[in-house]
Amino acid sequence: MKRRTVVRTIGIGTATAVGVAGCLTRDGDDDPPNGGEDGDPEPDEPDHEGTLRIATYRSMVAGPNPAAPRLEETFEEAYPDADLEWVVPNSGLEHYIRRGEYEAEIDVDVCFGFTVGDLAQIDDRIGEGRLLRELNLDRIDGTDRIRDELDLEDPHGRALPYDTGYVSLVYDETELGAPESFADLLGSTYENALLAQHPVTSIPGQAFLLWTIETADAETAFDYWEELVANGVRVHDSWSNAYRGAYMDGQRPMVVSYSTDPVFAAAEGYERDRHRVAFPNDEGYALSEGMGIFEEADEPDLAYAFLEHVLAVDSQHELARRNVQFPAVEDAGPSPEFSEVARQPAEPVTTSYTELRGTLGEWLEDWTGRFDDPLEDQ
């Protein structure tokens, strides 16, 4: 059996979105083409032979101890006639949303790593319940073990959470102290100190933007971002580039990341002083990551098997340890070592699907229009 993790990296652009031969079939119907118990029945003999292609983000497949190779190994042990191939689009799920808008071919089966905001974007830009199929939960053992508070609230039943975390600020306390509020980040103490991520191409980057909006309102939040940019925030296109690149290289003493980063630091033997967690206003942005199956998946049976495999206790433990996030299922609690070091905010905040529907796209467009050029000039 092979043990070579295959990863494909792909870009995004208008040319690639429309310059393909295959197209999705819509036929003017407002209902998704498949999904649900009636539209996605379990076959008498599921086909578990073939190559399952999974779209995910870079840190899932690369870095000191990524989760993808271990998930691949255990899945292929359980399904010896299957191979996994990981696909990392440079622009995240935006790559597939763009292709969906142009009705272009999508040649992956599973989407692994998206948020409730992504679901709202799909419905705003492609159509209600599109891109990912409504899941038949009868085909996935273990969904009853998912913690209730992690529900992604998708009205079309396309998503299951596989882990959760809290976006926060991680800082080097040998160089500066923790900000007590968002206003503190605008002061001279934090000038040219903060690393963040682009909200269009990064999950924690989008969460940080939404956090600033939740703290105030959209208009006030963008005024706040004007001041944050003026105070020297540097924005990277991905969490990996901001955290594993710039922050770990010591380029700046603070980064938008996760409150579980001290677990990573302890496991890798890094100095804990450089991995302290700050919760401005005692808040952290609660962020569950979801998984689903694309409408046009070539390997739906393998895709369902993979989603079930991810919810298994052993897989949940591996994801918690390697992805450094909290497990999604009730019977896979974090290890004592994890619980001792990981932080949780006193006041978790988040934004619901209903709040994001019809507004997230406008916020992202507004943010990009205002700040992309000034940030490129840094």
Image: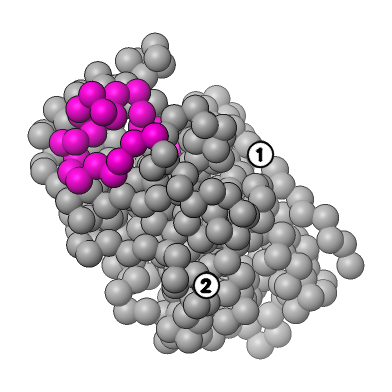
**How many numbered marks are there?**
2
- Under circle 1, the secondary element is strand
Q: Measuring from the top left, give residue 152's x and y in whole percent.
A: 33, 66
Q: Which residues are magenta?
A: 175-203
Confirm whether the magenta stretch covers residue 190.
yes
In the foreground, 102 or 254: 254
Query: Residue placed at 31% from the left, 50% from the top?
Result: 278
Confirm whether the magenta stretch covers residue 365.
no
Which quadrant holds the N terminus? bottom right
In the foreground, 54 or 199: 199
Q: Which residue is mark 1?
A: 9
Query: Residue placed at 63% from the left, 36% from the top?
Result: 10
Q: Which residue is mark 2?
A: 337
Comparing marks 2 and 1, which lies closer to the viewer? 2
In this rendering, is residue 149 above or below 270? below
Residue at the right extreme of this rendering: 1
